[in-house]
Amino acid sequence: MINIFEVNETNKMIEQENLDVRTITMGISLLDCIDPDLDRLNEKIYEKITTKARNLVEAGDRIATEYGIPIVNKRISVTPIAIIGASACKCAGDFAAIAKTLDRAAKEVGVNFLGGYSALVSKGMTPAEELLIESIPQAMAETERVCSSVNVGSTRTGINMDAVRLMGETIVQTAKATRDQDSLGCAKLVVFCNAPDDNPFMAGAFHGVTEGDCIINVGVSGPGVVKTALKKVRGKDFETLCEMIKRTAFKVTRVGQLVALEASKALGVPFGIVDLSLAPTPAIGDSVAEILEEIGLERVGAPGTTAALALLNDQVKKGGVMAAEAVGGLSGAFIPVSEDQGMIDAVNAGSLTLEKLEAMTCVCSVGLDMIAIPGDTSPSTIAGIIADEAAIGMINQKTTAVRLIPVIGKGVGEVVEFGGLLGYAPIMPVNSFSCEAFVARGGQIPAPIHSFKN
């Protein structure tokens, strides 16, 4: 039974510590929409999304009002479009037409983002997948709510370096296509290794082919709650610290579980997973970086940062997994730069570099996330950064990703403003030495020996 103390405690978390449910994401399979005729395909896609998700926003708002729990975003993920459009799309423009249909459907039902303009190419690329990747710059420039992702590697298959090279070029072209918005299109594009099928967070959400026809996934967030809790154990030993994080993560996740079950019931859609991630926002006090500093760092990036992040990630998972029926997605701590005021402050103070961020991604949930870099960064350098992150994910059997934003016309020391949850970011320097010959080799980096488990 929930007692009055727990009710009051949860209310305090919501009112004073930025506790929220970051997203309710409805996953929709589009496999039954496949059609060789492009017009019919677009009609089927629009019809299915607008039918399945017609009450999603209303249900989310009603649950938020009834329980007093902020639900920040309502979103949709769909089956990777490279699969859905394979038989109908003969050129990149055909895929871009599907992106516009997705955008129109997202606007019709009122969600803020729709993910799944995606290709899964960890071992090789079909002609359709190459066309989808070629279409990404146009699709990101001509839509508002569509998000794109490409999975270029996995522990079981290795890293597709042809796809990595292509994604380096695609990110630069997307930046150029949206240069009038400070290259905002790249904020909607993420490159993965070991991408999960049930991730509710954008920009990397897609509805995996192993999922059901329609499901509800929920992503919770509570960096401010964790930070406030840790103030109570300042100076205590690591065992006490870890226990506090686990207890707090349990409470935060229970809120997500409640919302997930209520949304599932209201929409008549099966519950999928709760994603345990600590996802920051630009709001003061809602920062993962500030949690790490509360643990004992003068500033994020100082020696001990990677160990503190590893501890945080692990304890969040240990506490959260007991509070939800099913846990999935990314589940851990996000460390974006632009969306986390503490991370931005660390970059500006000189304590946090791209190289230190890469080290931190060995133990975090995602990878190099929402990082603005100079607009003249070469495609091969971006591809090299993607390859580094994919290698970390492949070897460590975890999800890693890259969401870099080469801001055309701007350089190190300047600031780019994205607005809303995306916040703003200082443009970070990138190692200027070339990896052109490495990236140009092409082919496949083989899977590691521990991938062979049959």
Image: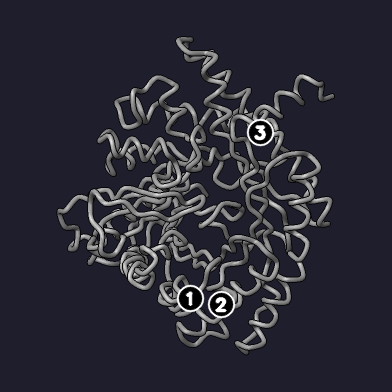
Q: Nearer the viewer, mark 2 or mark 3?
A: 3
Element type at mark 3: helix
Q: Are marks 1 and 3 in contact (CB under 8 Å)?
A: no
Numbered label attached to residue 100: 2
Element type at mark 1: helix
Cα distance, mark 1 to mark 2? 7 Å
Up/down of 380 relative to 363, above or below: below
Q: Are marks 1 and 2 in contact (CB under 8 Å)?
A: yes
Q: Which residue is mark 1?
A: 142
**Quarter location, residue 88:** bottom right
At label 2, counting other C-alpha atoms closer than 10 Å, the crowd grade (few under 14, some 14-19, many 20 or more) is some
Q: Which three-letter amino acid code belongs to the residue tagged 1? A: Glu
In the rendering, at what x and y percent does residue 253 appear? Answer: 66, 35
In the rendering, at what x and y percent does residue 344 appear? Answer: 36, 40
**Quarter location, residue 184:** bottom left
Numbered label attached to residue 14: 3
Q: Which three-letter amino acid code belongs to the residue tagged 2? A: Lys
> Left or right of 196: which side holds 388?
left
At a point 34% along the width and 55% down the height, the residue shown is 386
Q: Nearer the viewer, residue 329 or 153?
A: 329
